[in-house]
Amino acid sequence: MSRSRRLHLQTVTVPSVTLTENREATIPLHPGWNIISNPLDIDVSWSAVEQANGVDLQPIWGFEGSFSESAAFASAKSGRAFYFLNDQQLETLVIPYQIATEKQKSVSEPELHITLELEIEGGGGLEKWHYIY
């Protein structure tokens, strides 16, 4: 009895967030309500976002069983997104990349996570593995 296995590899390119010279990320907006997420690997206070944009902004609204205002713009790695009313007609929302310690100041870009999925098909059926780096 011959056993054969096939290995299927899928290459996925995940772009990292590009920061401006001022260490800020930007999110494109349209007028009215937007669903936004923080593309950085850290939470950012909403007051820091207001300061970076130079205007008083509407609050962001999260949903966890009911809608509530949020003082922190949680990183998208938390799985959260927010509703935001763009009544200032902004084209982009500036998100500052705040550094907490001197050690972190040497970091030039947010961390990149890579997901690898493997499938091996053989006589015993299909085996699947899921790795996150």
Image (tube, rainbow, N blue to C red):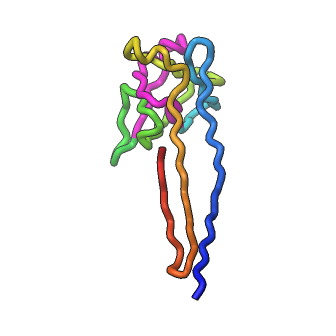
x then y, percent, for residue 43? 41, 28
Residue name at image x 54 percent, y 19 percent: 108
Vertical order, 24 against 117 (above or below): above
Q: Nearest the camera: 130 or 121?
A: 121
x then y, percent, for residue 119? 56, 65
**Number of marks present in the image shown:** 0
Report the quarter where the N terminus lies. bottom right
User: Quadrant of residue 122 in the image?
Assistant: bottom right
User: Quadrant of residue 117 in the image?
Assistant: bottom right
x then y, percent, for residue 82? 46, 37
Image position of 99 (left or right of 64): right
Based on the picture, tell me whether residue 44 belongs to the magenta stretch. yes
Residue name at image x 56 percent, y 19 percent: 24
Q: Nearest the camera: 11 or 67?
A: 11
In the current view of this chain or complex, which residue is farthest to the front? 1
* Magenta region: 36-62
Vertical order, 72 against 35 (above or below): above
Image position of 122 (left or right of 45): right
Vertical order, 36 against 26 (above or below): below
Based on the picture, tell me whether residue 46 belongs to the magenta stretch. yes
Residue name at image x 47 percent, y 48 percent: 132
User: Quadrant of residue 25 in the image?
Assistant: top right
x then y, percent, for residue 14? 62, 41
Vertical order, 5 against 52 (above or below): below
Residue name at image x 55 percent, y 60 percent: 118
Q: Nearest the camera: 129 or 56?
A: 129
Q: Nearest the camera: 7 or 28?
A: 7
